[in-house]
Image (cartoon, rainbow, N blue to C red):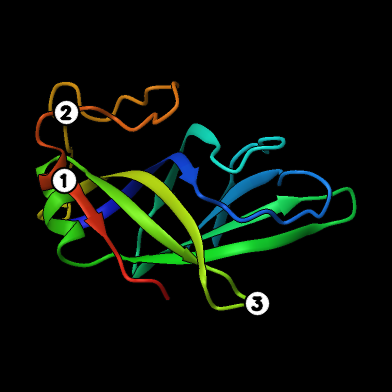
Amino acid sequence: MALHTLTITVVNAEDLPRADTFSKSDPFVQVKVGSVIKKTSVKRNDQNPHYGETFHFNITNEKKIDIEVFDDDAVGSDSMGVGKVPIEEPLLKELRKGGAKVNVPLQSKKKGKSAGNVHLIVQGDFDNDGDIRAGTSMPIGFGRVDPRPGGYPDDRDHDRHEHRYPSP
């Protein structure tokens, strides 16, 4: 059973550093799988932005999900923090069960210190025997994004599905 497609929802980011001197940051999240890059919308003046934005990636031999948060400025964008999620066990095991909530700790590129977290929901489609495509299904109540502060999906089995990955 080979992983065919990844569906990644950027739920929110939290505890992002201030990147601007006179105002809060204007963050957006960049998700990269292989050579494909997708970006969330920009959230103005917010150190704890909520996104609820979903992206789809075709998978061949990709081994990781790269996450980078940027501060959007009038002249370019500055990196606020980077993180990665390996596409291997235990993530693959959770994808086979229906999906995983993933906390991605961010590290500052410049200072090498903690730069907050990004919360994702990751789902996968798998090929059975190479010719039948079978999509995974999500348990009831799993995968909905609550737009309120704290906006992390609420289920009774939270700890079983959340994984923390070490910083790069």
- Label 1 element class: helix
Q: CA distance from mark 1 to mark 3?
A: 32 Å
Which kind of residue does numbered mark 2 sit on?
Asp
Q: Residues within 10 Å of mark 1 (few under 14, many from 20)?
A: some
Q: CA distance from mark 3 to mark 2?
A: 37 Å
Point out the frontmost of discs 1 and 3: 3
Percent coordinates x, y for residue 15 in the rendering: 51, 50
Q: Residues within 10 Å of mark 3 (few under 14, many from 20)?
A: few
Q: Earlier in the sequence, mark 1 or mark 2?
A: 2
Q: Residue at x 14, y 50 (%)?
A: 94
Q: Residue at x 71, y 47 (%)?
A: 25
Q: CA distance from mark 1 to mark 2?
A: 10 Å
Relative to 114, 73 lies left or right: right
**Badges 1 and 2: C-beta atoms under 8 Å apart?**
yes
Which kind of residue does numbered mark 3 sit on?
Lys
Relative to 166, 54 lies left or right: right
| Residue highlighted by disc 1 | 161
Residue placed most toward the observer, 79 or 5: 79
Percent coordinates x, y for residue 147 in the rendering: 44, 22
| Residue highlighted by disc 3 | 110
The quarter of the picture where residue 10 lies is top left
- Label 2 element class: loop
Name, please, the residue furthest toward the front: 22
Q: Residue at x 46, y 39 (%)?
A: 12
| Residue highlighted by disc 2 | 155
Q: Residues within 10 Å of mark 2 (few under 14, many from 20)?
A: some
Residue 39 in view (yes/no): yes
Residue 62 in view (yes/no): no
